[in-house]
């Protein structure tokens, strides 16, 4: 197992946002780039559905907590509109809009990398492996939703990121699809090619760096 190594130079003044950037990129760089699920198979879900469901719900919760945490740290008001988190301030800067809209994806990317680590390191604990697989399935499920019926939703994350950057919903959906496709490969393949995990982690790190330096 080896680590994905990178060096990040930050030249702007210190603030909460830049502090988070350092932490996020450091975590992304230190997570094992060889993480895969070669010791786990989807058939294991049938023997322990509760653990997988627990992990899946944890992945969904992590996504929503990402929005709440970044909004709180940036001093941005938020409220719930049904199952959606909305930001009532009409004068949100493009930077803040991008940060809060993308926060869910960022946290689920980190959660999925941590889950892959557990899948490799918990070979003797099938409950832990199924819970980790559930987290990854949550990440894949959320991404699939944003590639389909939530892609153009007026309160959706992709729409918010598009409004903040001027980048089309289709292009942003493609960007979040890439790590998800690679992670699906990592989770379901019997043998994962060695290049897949580091490339997946790299795409996530690049996405996070782009958001926080936008």
Image: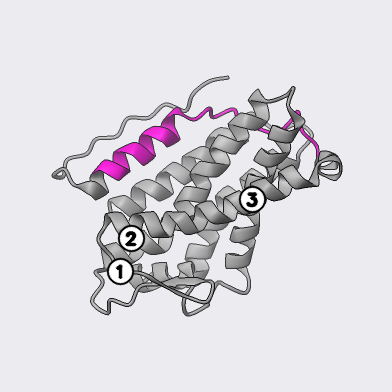
Residue at 73% across, 27% down: 125
Marks 1/2 in contact by CB < 8 Å: the verdict is yes
Task: Specify whether 38 is left or right of 118.
Answer: right
Residue at 37% across, 62% down: 100
Mark toward the viewer: 3 or 1: 1
- Asked whether 24 falls inside the magenta stretch, the response is yes
**Numbered disc 1: secondary structure:** loop
- Neighbours of disc 3 within 10 Å: few (<14), some (14-19), many (20+): some
Q: Is residue 195 visible?
A: no
**Numbered disc 2: secondary structure:** helix
Mark-to-mark CA distance, 2 and 3: 28 Å
What residue does disc 2 label? 71
- Asked whether 25 falls inside the magenta stretch, the response is yes
**Numbered disc 3: secondary structure:** helix
What residue does disc 3 label? 181
Q: In the rendered view, would you say 82 is above or below 114? A: below
Task: Specify whether 185 is left or right of 20.
Answer: right
Mark-to-mark CA distance, 3 and 1: 33 Å
Q: Toward the viewer: 107 or 159?
A: 107
Residue 119, label in figure: none
What residue does disc 1 label? 77
Mark toward the viewer: 2 or 3: 2
Q: Quadrant of the N terminus?
A: top right
Q: Is residue 95 visible?
A: yes
Write the start and end of the magenta stretch as one range.
19-41
Q: How many marks?
A: 3
Q: In the rendered view, would you say 75 is above or below 91? A: above
Task: Specify whether 77 is left or right of 197.
Answer: left
Q: Position of residue 26 (x, y in %)?
A: 37, 33
Mark sitting earlier along the chain (2/3): 2
């Amino acid at each position: 197992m080896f680590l994905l190594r990178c060096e990040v130079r930050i030249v702007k003044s210190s603030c909460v946002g830049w502090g988070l950037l350092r932490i996020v990129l450091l975590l992304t760089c230190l997570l094992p780039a060889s993480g895969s699920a070669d010791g786990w198979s989807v058939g294991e879900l049938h023997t322990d559905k509760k653990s997988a469901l627990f992990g899946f719900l944890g992945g969904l919760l992590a996504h929503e907590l990402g929005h709440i945490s970044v909004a709180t740290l940036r001093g941005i008001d938020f409220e719930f509109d049904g199952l959606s988190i909305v930001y009532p301030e009409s004068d949100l800067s493009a930077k803040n809009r991008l940060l809060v809209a993308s926060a869910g994806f960022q946290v689920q990317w980190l959660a999925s990398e941590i889950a892959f680590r557990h899948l490799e390191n918990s070979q003797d604990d099938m409950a832990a492996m199924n819970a980790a697989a559930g987290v990854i399935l949550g990440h894949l499920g959320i991404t699939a939703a944003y590639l389909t019926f939530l892609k153009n939703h007026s309160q959706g994350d992709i729409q918010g990121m598009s409004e903040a950057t001027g980048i089309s919903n289709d292009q942003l959906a493609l960007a979040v699809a890439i790590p998800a496709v690679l992670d699906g490969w990592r989770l379901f393949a019997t043998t994962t090619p060695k290049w897949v995990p580091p490339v997946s982690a790299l795409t996530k790190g690049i996405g996070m760096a782009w958001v926080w330096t936008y």
